[in-house]
Image: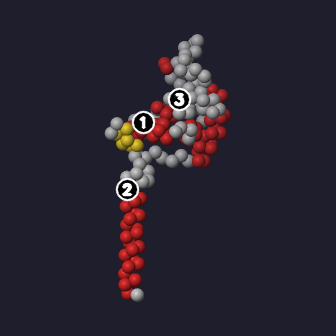
């Protein structure tokens, strides 16, 4: 009986130590994103409530031009007769995920850059900063893992927002 009092706590301690080692070893849990030797913290989880709110706001404010399924205009890479560019897709097939959060939020608020032949209107007077972030969160929810990681890395290495 005396021996059992020693063995059980020792076994429990060994079990907890093994579990801690397994859970905190590389490959377990959130990992940083490393590209070209530069590391940023792990990709944050998306907030389901913000994604749902962003989906509603996207449908109302963005879907008419960028597509209800985020597909963008057909031939979005080709200039229109007036020299402007059609609205790009916001899914992984487009280039939205190539840009940091700060730039994307600037574009939503201030509109597209005329020098880049964009006709996107500004939404800064219509949407709150939180609503714009919700739209961006919804857009991100439609990207694959690689696109999310790359976009997060770009955001982190560009100074964030």
Report the Cα–Cα distance between label 2 and label 1.
26 Å
Q: Which residue is mark 3?
A: 94
Q: Nearer the viewer, residue 18 or 121?
A: 18
Quarter holding residue 154: top left
Q: Residues within 10 Å of mark 2 (few under 14, many from 20)?
A: few
Is any atom of residue 119 visible in this view? no
Q: Do the residues bearing badges 3 and 1 touch, measured as CB atoms within 8 Å?
A: no
160 on left or right of 142: left
Identity of the residue drawn at 51% across and 31% down:
96
Percent x, y for residue 51?
Answer: 59, 43
Q: Quadrant of the C terminus?
A: top left
Report the Cα–Cα distance between label 3 and label 2.
36 Å
Q: Which residue is mark 1?
A: 154
Mark linked to residue 84: none
Quarter holding residue 18: bottom left
Q: Secondary structure at mark 3?
A: loop
Percent x, y for residue 134?
Answer: 57, 41
Q: Secondary structure at mark 1?
A: helix
Q: Which residue is mark 2?
A: 25
């Amino acid at each position: 009986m005396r021996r059992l009092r020693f063995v059980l706590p020792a076994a429990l301690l060994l079990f907890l130590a093994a579990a801690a080692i397994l859970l905190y070893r590389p490959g377990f849990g959130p990992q940083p994103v490393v590209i070209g030797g530069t590391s940023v913290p792990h990709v944050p989880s998306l907030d389901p409530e913000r994604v749902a709110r962003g989906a509603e706001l996207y449908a109302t404010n963005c879907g008419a031009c960028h597509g209800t399924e985020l597909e963008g205009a057909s031939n979005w890479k080709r200039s229109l007769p007036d020299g402007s560019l059609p609205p790009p897709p916001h899914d992984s097939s487009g280039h939205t995920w190539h840009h940091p959060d700060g730039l994307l939020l600037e574009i939503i608020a201030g509109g597209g850059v005329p020098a880049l032949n964009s006709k996107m209107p500004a939404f800064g007077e219509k949407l709150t900063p939180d609503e714009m972030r919700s739209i961006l969160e919804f857009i991100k929810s439609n990207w694959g893992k690689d696109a999310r990681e790359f976009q997060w890395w770009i955001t982190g290495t560009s100074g964030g927002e």
